[in-house]
Amino acid sequence: MNRLILAFLLTAPSIDAKVLIMTYVHSKPDFIELHDKTFKAFFKDPYEYVVFNDAPNQAMCNQVEHTCSRLGIRCFRVPPHAKGRQTPNYRHMDGIKHSLNLLAYEHDDIVMMVDADMFLIKPFSARHYLEEHGYDFVGDRNAGRIARQERIIHSSPAFVIMNMPALPNRRTISFEGDRVEGVPCDVGGHTYYYFKQNPEVRVHLYQCISTTHLPLERHQLASMGYDDVTIDFLFDIAHPYGMQFHCDHNFLHYYAGGSNWCNNSAAYIREKDGKLYRYMNRLFDKYGSLR
């Protein structure tokens, strides 16, 4: 059989192929419902959305499981964390490792990883995005530290798209952090090793855009591609809220909203949540029929 035809058959999605979307939930089960609504409204590929439950106590665990059950979402409990791995970073690493072993490594189609507070904000096809640009792995660029005059460039796990059938040595993909080439790195640091050992993989690591770095002039924001709903939202949240846009402005990272690891006050969270929900409801009205 012609090699090109064989390669196509090995990498082309089957008729019933689905994008596997995985998220890792510590708290705020209401965000699971918002996630579910955004993917149903905007995600253009056949998909399955799966929750990995990393709740810190039984009461929150039950809330997460109840929300998933009510919405018909598969939910897996992250195994107990070892002593010394109770911090947010280590918990995230453990959840990702469990999800890769349980589902992602063997998935025969695209795998997406999204933070629990990462929301799709317009119609989007992961398959088209990969095919249009010729990518195998898309992630959020993290320049990390410098070791031996070399910058440790790796992918953050906040938002990732992986075309699993096209990735060689897929079981060596790791989002561990800790030390890389002897220097401390954040979660996802070990993707540096995967990229280095598999140079044929077509990797695209985009730079996320922080709302604190955007101009507050309507005409400037419009010229950068932001729609009227998002511009109104940017004026509403102002700079202190520290949200981010990812993957060419297709996703909004609420930032620390899924676990509140930065310990903001309840009043602050209520105000910020209200602004988020008002924004998302306006987006559903604007784009929901375009899926």
Image (spheres, rainbow, N blue to C red):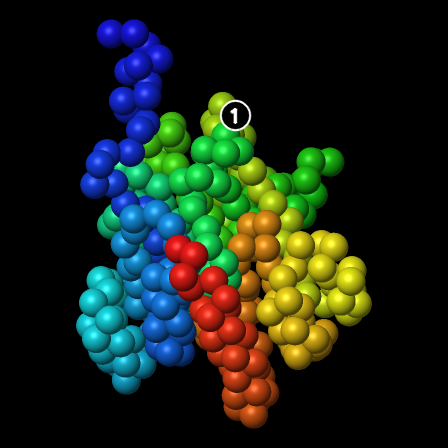
Q: Name the residue at 38% across, 29% down.
A: 166
Question: In this orientation, which residue lies closer to the viewer: 258 or 229?
Answer: 229
Residue in the foreground of this view, choosing between 102 and 133: 133
Which quarter of the rendering shows the N terminus?
top left
For the question of whether residue 158 can be seen, the reply is no
Camera-nearest residue between 257 and 102:
257
Secondary structure, mark 1, is loop
Quadrant for the C terminus in the image: bottom left
In percent of the image, x 76 and y 67: which residue is there?
A: 218
Neighbours of disc 1 within 10 Å: few (<14), some (14-19), many (20+) = few
Q: Which residue occupies 73% across, 36% down?
A: 149
Q: Which residue sits at x=61%, y=41%?
A: 153
| Percent coordinates x, y for residue 106 in the rendering | 25, 40
Please state if 71 lies on the left or on the right of 171 as rendered. Answer: left
Outermost residue, top side: 2
37 shown above or below 43: below
| Residue 225 picture location, percent across and down | 67, 54
Q: Disc 1 residue type?
A: Pro
Residue located beneath label 1 in the image: 199
Q: Can see residue 9?
A: yes
The location of residue 44, given as percent across then percent down, is 38, 50
Residue 60: percent from the left, percent from the top?
A: 31, 81
Q: Which residue lies furthest to the bottom in this view?
A: 267
Q: In the image, is residue 185 above or below residue 197?
A: below
Q: How many numbered marks does the figure carry?
A: 1
| Vertical placement of residue 6 versus 211, above or below | above
Which quadrant of the structure image shows residue 76?
bottom left
Q: Which of 267 and 34 is in front in this view?
A: 34
